[in-house]
Image: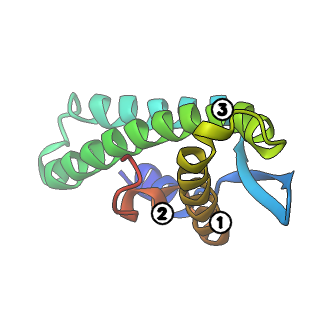
Amino acid sequence: VMEVSVWFEQTDFSFMDHPVKGGVVPLVKDWKDLLSEVSDKQSLCGSLKDSRFFGPFKDQVDKFEEKFGILDELLLCMNKVQRKWVYLEPIFGRGSLPREKERFDKVNNMFRQNMKNIGQNKKVNFVCTQKGLKD
């Protein structure tokens, strides 16, 4: 249980700066490793239930299972959004598709703000505290 707790509380994102007009946007890198680690921790929580010493840790393990489920879902969503943003940002940045620009600008501003906040905090578990991130 301690291993799961330490990972959840102390693991940082790995970032790379993506240059854009007016500065940079921190983008998460090493998605595969991160998602693999989350999956490993979820499996560890599941295997702890098979231990004969599980009883006193049941509440803690149940909470971590829930947290890792939420984290997994958020990270998969973030990965998908980041990939789409990296693809679309240069297209809209050079003025293509002017009819859709206003709509993209709203999403672009929200994405940049979310990534700025996550980049400043750096902790993977921070995404679980962000209201509306999945939306």
Q: Earlier in the sequence, mark 1 or mark 2?
A: 1
Kind of residue at badge 1: Lys
Q: Residue at x 64, y 59 (%)?
A: 112
In this figure, which residue is indicated by the disc labeled 2?
126
Nearer the camera: disc 1 or disc 2: 1
Q: Earlier in the sequence, mark 3 or mark 1?
A: 3
In this figure, which residue is indicated by the disc labeled 3?
83
Q: Residue at x 59, y 56 (%)?
A: 11
Q: Position of residue 59 (x, y in %)?
A: 15, 54
Tell me how far mark 1 sits from mark 2, CA to CA.
12 Å
Whether the residues at callouts 2 and 3 have beta carbons within 8 Å, the answer is no
- Kindly state the secondary structure of the residue where label 2 is placed: helix
The 10 Å Cα crowd at callout 2, few under 14, some 14 to 19, many 20 or more, is: some
How are the residues colored?
Answer: rainbow
The image shows a total of numbered marks equal to 3
Q: Position of residue 101 (x, y in %)?
A: 63, 44
- Kindly state the secondary structure of the residue where label 1 is placed: helix
Q: Position of residue 62 (x, y in %)?
A: 19, 46
Q: Earlier in the sequence, mark 2 or mark 3?
A: 3
- Towards the viewer: 117 or 86: 86
In this figure, which residue is indicated by the disc labeled 1?
116
- Kindly state the secondary structure of the residue where label 3 is placed: helix
Side of 133 where 98 appears, left or right: right
- Towards the viewer: 25 or 4: 25
Tell me how far mark 2 sits from mark 3, CA to CA.
20 Å
Tell me how far mark 3 sits from mark 1, CA to CA.
16 Å
Kind of residue at badge 3: Arg
The 10 Å Cα crowd at callout 1, few under 14, some 14 to 19, many 20 or more, is: some
Q: Is residue 51 above or below residue 67?
A: above
Q: Residue at x 72, y 49 (%)?
A: 27
